[in-house]
Amino acid sequence: MSVLEKLIWQIEFQLHEALTLTRLSTGCAVSPHHMCRLFQQATGMSVMSYVRARRLSEAARAIAEQDRDILTAALEAGYASHEAFTRAFARYFGVLPSSVRKARSLSSLSLMEPIEMKKELIVDVAKPELRDRGAFRVVGLSTRCSFENTSAIPGLWQSVNVREPEVAGAIPGVAYGVCCDFEESGHFRYLAGIEATEKTDGMDFVDIPANRYAVFTHSGHISDISKTIYTIWNKSLPDAGLEPVKAPDFEVYDSRFDPETGRGVVEVWVPVA
């Protein structure tokens, strides 16, 4: 069973219990950071946002289909009062729970159903190499994005390629796509750039600390790298007994990758304990 499947199983069977990230990650035998990152990667939302959505969805079913009174549904969903539940329900569904109870219908609601693992995204990924790398800086351009929406990244790389000659203290030959500054919401900062010894006015940078890394290889077209990354976090890291640490991870584009065709070899470096 994958980490994602273990997590969903726990949430569904303990939905009305006091769930915390620590409790859930312990049940998955991974760190909270690993669990949250792979869940965001797979769903585009945070773990606890999903838990709240599932509780509200089950409460809506109880109110509409089982004639449950609103206070009982509120307490079962983990809310301390009728008022707190009503606010959360209206904010999520855009309608009051009393209206749903009166209508005895869920047709106007967009319910959160249990998430299923996307089996089609699991691909063959070779076992990683373990490498140590010292601290270094990447200078380029960055954008905020989410695992659900990375549409801005290709355009970002085009802009970086044009402005690469501006980078002060550049160490040419290798480009980096760095994922950093992760938020619980599932958003993060993606920086496309090159290694440099200095900062450059008008450009962004990220300082990457010294770490031990699990280095995976993606071969083929760049459009399929999302499948490789999904597999790394959901299967490859747990299968290898590796625990990622909270630090930037990055893609490495060297001479083996052809930016004109989008094909070649890309390395994915994940910091591990």
Image (spheres, rainbow, N blue to C red):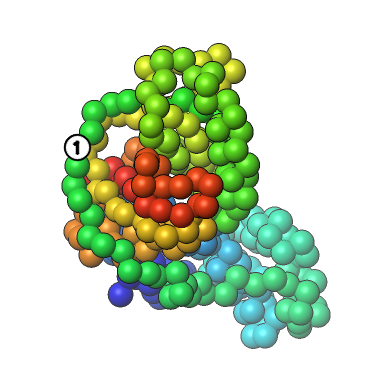
* Nearest to the observer: residue 132 or residue 93: 132
| Residue positioned 36% across, 47% down in the render | 256
Q: Is residue 152 above or below residue 63?
A: above
Q: Outermost residue, bottom direction?
A: 66
Q: Quadrant of the C terminus?
A: top left
* Nearest to the observer: residue 104 or residue 248: 248
User: On the image, which quarter does residue 10 sit in?
Assistant: bottom left
| Residue positioned 41% across, 53% down in the render | 264
Left or right? Give the position of 140 relative to 85.
Answer: left
Q: What count of labels does the image hold?
A: 1
Left or right? Give the position of 78 relative to 69.
Answer: left
For disc 1, the neighbor class at 10 Å (few under 14, some 14 to 19, many from 20) is few
Location of mark 1 (residue): 132
Q: Position of residue 19 (x, y in %)?
A: 41, 60
* Nearest to the observer: residue 109 or residue 98: 109
Q: Is residue 164 above or below residue 60?
A: above
| Residue positioned 59% across, 45% down in the render | 154
Q: Position of residue 246 (x, y in %)?
A: 33, 41
Left or right? Give the position of 101 relative to 161.
Answer: right
| Residue positioned 34% across, 59% down in the render | 232
Q: Position of residue 95 (x, y in %)?
A: 78, 65
User: On the image, which quarter does residue 5 sit in?
Assistant: bottom left
Q: Quadrant of the N terminus?
A: bottom left
Q: Is residue 49 above or below residue 9?
A: above
* Nearest to the observer: residue 131 or residue 253: 253
Amino acid type, callout 1: Asp
Q: Is residue 149 visible?
A: yes
What element does badge 1 sit on?
strand
Q: Is residue 80 visible?
A: no
